[in-house]
Image (cartoon, rainbow, N blue to C red):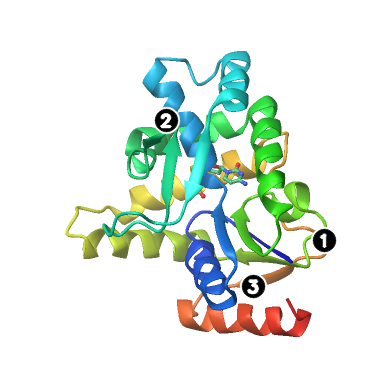
Amino acid sequence: MIIAIDGPAGSGKSTVARELARRLGFRYIETGSMYRAVAWAALQRGYAVEDADRLTALAANLDIDVRPTSVEDGRKYDVLVDGKDVTWAIRSQEVDGKVSIVAAHPGVRAALTDKQRAIGRRGKVVMVGRDIGTVVMPDAELKIYLDASPEERARRRYQERLARGEQADYAQILEAVHARDRLDRGRDVAPLRAAEDAVILNSDGLSIDEVFEEALRLVKARDC
Ligand code: DC
């Protein structure tokens, strides 16, 4: 019983996946947080994120733990690295800027894919990422590829920032969305793409509730 949800940043996949997991009583695993944890640990240690050998050894040896929320501060889960709570630290702009480079190293991907499969083998999980349906869990019972246009995704991020009272520049955000898409889609190993047997949902012009209802309909149709 594995539900794989992939798609680009800002497609709404985390929100939909979290709600699905809650409704079904499944665990919710956001694999991006594991790539972020490796990027954070590399920056802490002063490693160059381009150093494939060092980063591969780091990813293989790092103790990354994703657990249910222990603090009510808006977080969706706890992320611990070597026992330290890094839930918010891995969301920093510094990590944002480096994580795509870290995620492009084949050795890093192999190490994290192993960890993700070990979690998946326990079943009853909604796993979210870029390559869950194609590489990590190719036998998942249901695969959803959640898409949205770059403009729509940039607009959502722009409005989130304004809502938090932050300054935001739409053109700059749109350029960052395009840049991240190029890195995630263009890498040699496990690039972002829909699995052949994935159901593609485009969320342009839909509310998150509408996307969730559609995903729930797919789950029910599969008897997950
Ligand atoms: O979903 P996110 O923004 O937290 O992901 C962080 C980075 O990790 C992003 O550059 C894509 C990458 N990633 C990946 O390559 N494979 C995954 N399964 C999940 C995330």
Q: Position of residue 126 (x, y in %)?
A: 62, 63
Q: Position of residue 182 (x, y in %)?
A: 58, 42
Along the line of sight, the residue nearer the viewer: 201 or 69: 69
Identify the residue at image location x=50%, y=59%: 150
Identify the residue at image location x=47%, y=35%: 37
Identify the residue at image location x=82%, y=65%: 197
Dot 1 falls on a residue whose secondary structure is loop
Along the line of sight, the residue nearer the viewer: 130 or 33: 33
Q: Which residue is mark 1?
A: 196
Residue flagged by tag 3: what amino acid is it? Leu
Q: Describe residue 74's horizontal placement relative to residue 6 as left or right.
A: left
Q: Which residue is mark 2?
A: 40
Residue flagged by tag 2: what amino acid is it? Trp
Mark 3 against mark 2, which lies toward the viewer?
A: 2
Identify the residue at image location x=53%, y=31%: 63
Disc 3 from disc 2: Cα separation: 32 Å
For disc 1, the neighbor class at 10 Å (few under 14, some 14 to 19, many from 20) is few
Q: Earlier in the sequence, mark 1 or mark 2?
A: 2
Q: Which residue is mark 3?
A: 201
Dot 2 falls on a residue whose secondary structure is helix
* Above-or-below relation of 70 to 54: below
Along the line of sight, the residue nearer the viewer: 31 or 166: 31
Q: Describe residue 29's horizontal placement relative to residue 217 as left or right.
A: left
For disc 2, the neighbor class at 10 Å (few under 14, some 14 to 19, many from 20) is many
